[in-house]
Image (tube, grey):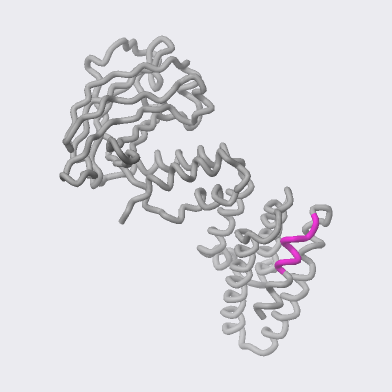
Amino acid sequence: MRPSLKKAMFHLAWSPDSLPTADSISPLLQYLDCHLQSLNAALLPKNFERALSEVWEVVLLELGHQMDGSSGDKLPGFYDRLHEALGILLAFFHADSLGLHLEALRTPTYFRVDQRLQYHRTDTERLMDLYHQQRLGAQLGCDSAEYGVLSVRAYFNHDSLCVEVLSARDVIPLDPNGFSDPFVIVELIPRRMFPHCAEQTTHVHKKTLNPVFDECFEFSVTLEQCRSEGAMILFTVMDHDVLTANDFAGEAFLALSSVPGVADTNSSIDNFHGLKQAELPLMHQKNRNHPILEVLETRLNDRTALDFVKKQRQRLATT
């Protein structure tokens, strides 16, 4: 079955954009219908249902193979057609409740293929935003401090965002002497929302895992910018090296919507006095096969996408 299915799926995926999805998927549906009728006649109902589930899984895997494959130049409507085809195939296997139940069709493989198709259909800037929003979500749910903790404070007042980097503790040792030379990069993201706000950097602290920075940075931004969806502060802790590239020690995220003066415009704040500091566990990306990064990596002619992936790959956990 697999070679014939692969051929029919290839026809679906690589049909010209001018051919409607309903037409390009027709050979695949005809093949499946014929094959499944034979199985239905030969098997008991329970066994047929099990076989139907297995065929569905194979169909999903073949669709995923065409989606992620690198053969040929993908036309503009390539992923839209595959996404529409996924819906048609779901309805085909459901068969108005005569086939598999929807719960049985929505397998982990189905959700994985559907998600990747959604990502492939999404532009690069939006995918970068989604990635950072997921990292912020991981920050909010992080209860481990295996890479150390960064202490910061921030407030907004009169078109000015003030960020104070206080200290870090238990920074991971990245130098042969068992210490690090840590410093912190502070930047506002997404970058396109803050085009005039360059990243700012603390001083380097030599041979320590518990640096005290006590440095304040100011960014000229508006309240509207701070309240934009996905606006956040990215803190990156690096280990300074003289002869080689600086090493990544950890990252932390702070949503601008949670910052005093942004979250509560009725309060008047003009300094850090009385503001509670935020204790942010430093994180590394542990998913080496993150779907967003894998999708961006396929955009070989998109320098923004490739640069973003390269930067994020450098932040992967080593173990």
In magenta, the rendered stretch is 9-16
For this view, does 282 lie left or right of residue 88? left
Instruction: Identify the residue at image location x=27%, y=31%.
Output: 183
What main secondary structure does the magenta stretch of the protein show? helix
Comparing 216 with 57, the one in front is 216
Instruction: Identify the residue at image location x=33%, y=25%.
Output: 201
Comparing 155 with 298, the one in front is 298
Q: Position of residue 220 (x, y in %)?
A: 43, 15
Q: Position of residue 31 (x, y in %)?
A: 75, 76
Check the image and report above or below for 117 versus 262: below
In the picture, the quarter occupied by the C terminus is bottom left
Residue, far bottom: 42
Q: Position of residue 75 (x, y in %)?
A: 74, 51
Check the image and report above or below for 94 versus 275: below
Instruction: Identify the residue at image location x=19%, y=32%.
Output: 206
Please tell me whether residue 316 belongs to the stretch shown in magenta.
no
Quarter location, residue 25: bottom right
Comparing 160 with 174, the one in front is 174
Q: Position of residue 255 (x, y in %)?
A: 39, 30
Residue, far front: 243
For this view, does 6 lie left or right of residue 243? right
Please tell me whether residue 14 belongs to the stretch shown in magenta.
yes
Check the image and report above or below for 18 versus 173: below
In the picture, the quarter occupied by the N terminus is bottom right
Instruction: Identify the residue at image location x=24%, y=44%.
Output: 174
Number of marks in the image? 0
Quarter location, residue 233: top left
